[in-house]
Amino acid sequence: MLLINIQSLIMSRFEQTSLTLKIKAARDFFDPKNFGFEKHGGGWKKALPEVGAIIFTSLGWEHVHLLTSLKDANSGNALELASQQQETVFGMEDPRDVMPPNLLSTMAKTGGSAFVAYTEKEGFTDAGWVGFGFVFGGNSVASESIFLGVRKEYRSQNSIGFYLRLLQSYTALENGYTRIEWTQCPLRGEIAKLGIGKLGGTVSRLTIDKYLGTNYTLYGPGSTDRITVEWDLLSPRTHQKITDISQGVYRGLTLEDVRGVPVVTGSNVHPFDECRDSTVLYEIPANADELDGESRITWRAELRKVFGLLMDTERVEVSGDAGNDPALVQKITTSGAYQIVDFATGFEGGVRRNFYVLNRKVMPS
């Protein structure tokens, strides 16, 4: 018995040492200096084509002392401006949906970060802000990204979202986390292309009506189902994708790459669940913003039908006798055989088409 305990202790210490070395290697890889950043006070600066120098820094309680200009010619502090950015990007009409300054001020203490990006020329003002990314510290492994947003005129250029994710990853690793997770609307192709296609995140879980009762004009009417992206910061696949992007040789999956792979829909999903296809595709809209309200509702209903069967799913069940007792609210989880591992996009006949790539999970023997 003593020998077994000693062997277990040695193995535990070996595994801990191995993990520590992996985290250090990943932290060295994600060092912002490797991607053209230079230190700027407590933050980082990077020159971007056609934009100029962009400053990236994480906010804390101390930034309540920094006064700046807010929208509508008002004045306030930096944390208030960070809150207003959410309203602008996500179209939040109810102030209860916005992460307030006092919560932003505590994110760093949880092991997370509240990064903002702004032009060096204008500073962190209503005219100069470019984007933001907020992450809470989580469990011992994963931190939780809450919001990532880029100002409309800076989207799809200069990789602002990509650089925010890089800085979040470096901070997470410094705090001992090996993974960042976030939820996102599964119909939005441009977000899927970044988080899954470019960064290498994977998705195993669909959450039914994650934000029931909220009113984000960005997402329009219908359900608020969300997928959870898991971004493994230690994965060689992640590092290779980041390297390819930074060296300008990244090539995402094209329509030609996935031609011939079975496409699952709401009408044929049951046979796919029962068969043993190792890889399937699921198509989402070319541009969710261009859908009318009825079309969005239809797309979301079909996506729930497909992903709800193929992937792990969590939903809430409120029993009839729950009344106003939150202790009687239950979260129900079901298992699925597939996970999203990549994203393919391209033009066909002049029309953009977007596909999630799902692989059947390898079950333990």
Image: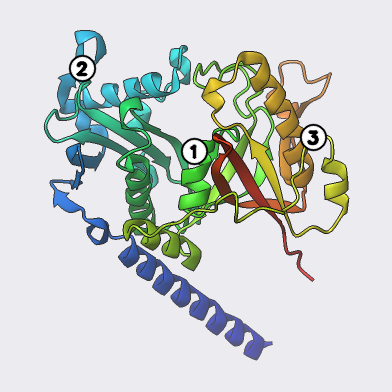
Query: Disc 2 designates what residue?
Result: 76
Residue 298's place in the image compared with 42, above or below, is above
Nearer to us of marks 2 and 3 is 3
Q: Secondary structure at mark 3?
A: loop
The residue type indicated by label 1 comes to: Ile
The residue type indicated by label 2 comes to: Gly
Query: Disc 3 designates what residue?
Result: 266
* Front residue of this view, candidates 295 and 28: 295
Q: Which mark is residue 251?
A: none
Q: Residue furthest bottom?
A: 3
Residue 314: image x %, image y %? 71, 38
Residue 130: image x %, image y %? 27, 31
Colour basis = rainbow
- Where on the picture, by quarter, is residue 29? bottom left
Relative placement, left or right, of 267 versus 187 is: right
Residue 254: image x %, image y %? 55, 51
Question: Between marks 2 and 3, how big is the CA–CA gap?
Answer: 49 Å
Q: Secondary structure at mark 2?
A: strand
Residue 274: image x %, image y %? 88, 51
Q: How many marks?
A: 3
